[in-house]
Image (spheres, rainbow, N blue to C red):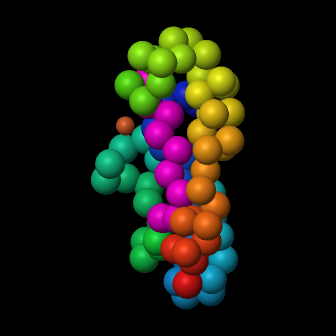
Amino acid sequence: MRGIGWAILYQDPENGKLINQWINEHDVGHPAGCNPLLVLDVFEHAFMIDYGLKRADYIAAFFKNIKWEAVEARLK
Ligand SMILES: [Fe+2]
């Protein structure tokens, strides 16, 4: 998938289903009415200082450090 933006896990409150969505603008592409449960920032500023061009290492570290109890607490 193309590089910059956010990968967001949403929950649709109408049916409870989970949706993974890639967003690259603050104001475009968010599924209407859905609640974000988990957001991975994949803009360069989020990882360049610590990881340089090693984006995959940043993403691996992100997943390793997710506090799933907090994500679960956002489910409705
Ligand atoms: Fe950011």
In reply to whether residue 45 is colored magenta, the answer given is no
Is residue 22 something one can see in this rendering? no
- Which of the pair 54/14 is nearer the observer? 54
Residue 71 lies in quadrant: bottom right
- Residue 30, position as x, y percentages in the image: 44, 60
Q: Can you name the residue that lies furthest to the left here?
A: 27
Q: Residue at x 68, y 41 (%)?
A: 64
Q: Is residue 10 above or below residue 5?
A: below
Q: Residue at x 48, y 64 (%)?
A: 36
Please count the marks in the image: 0
* Quadrant assignment for the C terminus: bottom right
Residue segment shown in magenta: 36-44
Q: Can you name the residue that lies furthest to the bottom here?
A: 14
* Quadrant assignment for the N terminus: top right
Answer with left or right where residue 1 lies relative to residue 32. right
- Ligand 1's image quarter is top left
- Residue 33, position as x, y percentages in the image: 42, 76
Q: Residue at x 42, y 16 (%)?
A: 49
Is residue 16 something one can see in this rendering? yes
- Residue 12, position as x, y percentages in the image: 55, 77
Question: Magenta region, mostly helix, strand or loop?
Answer: strand
Q: Residue at x 53, y 17 (%)?
A: 51
Answer with left or right where residue 64 lies relative to residue 4. right
- Residue 68, position as x, y percentages in the image: 64, 61
In reply to whether residue 43 is colored magenta, the answer given is yes
